[in-house]
Amino acid sequence: MGECKIEQNKTTCNCSYPCSRKGMCCECLSYHKSLGEVPACFFPDEVERTYDRTIENFIRVYQERGKCW
């Protein structure tokens, strides 16, 4: 497996929550999966800021807006 490019990842991470996993995508995914959630980068910015990372919210937003936002 390649090296984690934390600083590069941070430039595209839209998570507004102060978190120790910012830029470490594999840790972020694992953390949110353990909570039954999806990470911030799966949401448009204005939805991400609500901190509602539930799968149900992701499905609702995806159905309302389609694949591209």
Image (cartoon, rainbow, N blue to C red):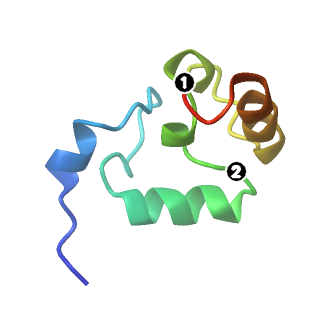
Residue 10 horizontal side relative to residue 49, left or right: left
Label 2 crowding class (10 Å Cα cut-off): few <14, some 14-19, many 20+?
A: some
Residue nearer the viewer, 20 or 40: 40
Amino acid type at circle 1 is Trp
The earlier-in-sequence mark between 2 and 1 is 2
Q: Residue at x 65, y 20 (%)?
A: 50
Please name the residue that numbered disc 1 is placed on.
69
Distance CA(mark 2)–CA(mark 1) = 20 Å
Location of residue 24 in the rendering, given as x and y in whole percent from the top left corner = 33, 57
Location of residue 12 in the rendering, given as x and y in whole percent from the top left corner = 29, 37
Label 1 crowding class (10 Å Cα cut-off): few <14, some 14-19, many 20+?
A: few
Mark 2 lies on a secondary structure that is loop
Residue 14 location, quadrant: top left
Q: Which residue is drawn at 55% across and 66% down?
A: 30
Vertical side of 33 occupied by 57: above or below: above
Vertical side of 66 occupied by 37: above or below: below
Location of residue 9 in the rendering, given as x and y in whole percent from the top left corner = 25, 48
Mark 1 lies on a secondary structure that is loop
Amino acid type at circle 2 is Glu
Residue 10 horizontal side relative to residue 63, left or right: left
Q: Residue at x 41, y 66 (%)?
A: 26
Q: Which residue is drawn at 68% across and 65% down?
A: 34
The label number, if any, that marks residue 37 in the structure image = 2
Vertical side of 6 occupied by 51: above or below: above
Residue 3 horizontal side relative to residue 66, left or right: left
Residue 10 horizontal side relative to residue 33, left or right: left
Disc 2 or disc 1, which is closer to the eye? 1
Vertical side of 46 occupied by 53: above or below: below
Residue 57 location, quadrant: top right
Residue 31 location, quadrant: bottom right
